[in-house]
Amino acid sequence: MPALNEISPLNLMRLIGTPQCPVIVDVSTDDDFDENPTLIPTAIRDPHTQIAALAASLAGKEVVITCHKGLKLSHGSAALLRTNAIDAQVLSGGNVAWTTAGLPRVPVAQIPGSLWVTRHRPKIDRIACPWLIRRFVDPNATFLFVPPSTVADVADRFNATAFDIEDCDWTHDGTDCTFDMMVKRFALRHPALDTLATIVRAADTDRHALAPQAAGLLAISVGLSRMYRDDTAQLEAGMLIYDALYRWARDGQDEGHNWPAGRKE
């Protein structure tokens, strides 16, 4: 059972993927990190010796500190943050406990920069992928939407990562859509994300028989694109759609609806 000012791996995992996710800071030593160069989803690395300098950027935010085993480095760092009036907890058992629980860890080598670029007028994959990145990889990621013919050049000139276009590193692979590829490459295997990936793939590749929710996602996505002329504003609105789908996939699939209330047939 987690002690005072600690949060368990399972409880933290329930926050990851939602707008309520705290800032996760990994203060493990370089030696421990080099043995397993992965991060808890959305985590940033910062040495414990620099944690006080990080305090200003964490003002007003909830924070979870983790290290190898969740002991001295984590508790000392969290205590320092609390002296700066920051709500800081420690991941109980640290990265060892997280891994033992079978929870996903993102390979750092797979994380490019924070700037991404894709085709303008997004529909499904080009909203779902930014949602996945912001909710599970890099909360501060920025997405550029440009004419299709300029994506590769914009990626080159602005040092951005192109996605969901042909002949780039982050795109469809066979029957899998770009969202599928990101789930795999970021090692985000989780039952809720697997369910969501099936829905996105079905809607994005016109194979609605794969998931009954696909037709609805397509309709909502097309409608959303007609509501917004600005792609960035559309992305912000679309984040809510995938927040809702993720919560349904995670813990709402057993709930139905009928009339009159309570009717079972």
Image (cartoon, helix red, strand yellow):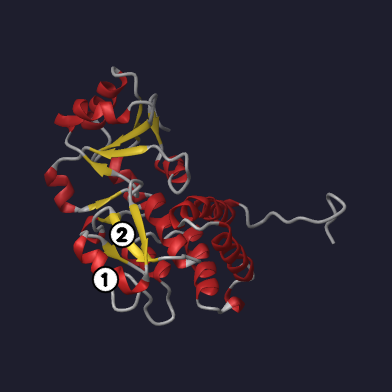
Residue visible at 35% across and 32% down? Answer: 63
Q: Distance from label 2 to label 1 (Cα)?
A: 11 Å
Amino acid found under the numbered disc labelled 1: Ala
In the image: residue 122, left or right of residue 241: left
Quadrant of residue 183 within the rendered picture: bottom left
Q: Residue at x 58, y 51 (%)?
A: 251
Most extreme residue toward the right is: 260
Comparing 180 with 229, the one in front is 229
* Element type at mark 1: helix
Considering only vertical position in the picture, is 43 above or below 149?
Answer: above
Q: Quadrant of residue 97?
A: top left
Q: x%, y% of residue 4?
A: 39, 24
Tell me the quadrant of the picture where the N terminus can be found. top left
Ranked by sequence position, the earlier of labels 2 and 1 is 2
**In the image, residue 245 lies at what x, y percent?**
56, 56
Camera-side residue of 185 and 219: 219
* Residue at the outermost left position: 31
At 43% from the left and 54% from the top, the residue drawn is 232
Residue 73: name its quadrant: top left
The image shows a total of numbered marks equal to 2
> Which residue is identified by label 2?
116
The answer to whether residue 40 is left or right of residue 207 is left
Of all residues shown, which one is farthest toward the front? Answer: 229
Query: Residue 154: percent from the left, percent from the top?
Result: 26, 65
Within 10 Å of disc 2 (Cα), the crowding (few <14, some 14-19, many 20+) is many
Which residue was labeled with disc 1?
A: 152
Left or right: residue 207 versus residue 23 is: right
Disc sitting over residue 82 in the figure: none
Q: Which callout, 2 or 1, points to the residue nearer the camera?
A: 1
Quarter that holds the C terminus: bottom right
Q: Position of residue 71 (x, y in %)?
A: 25, 32
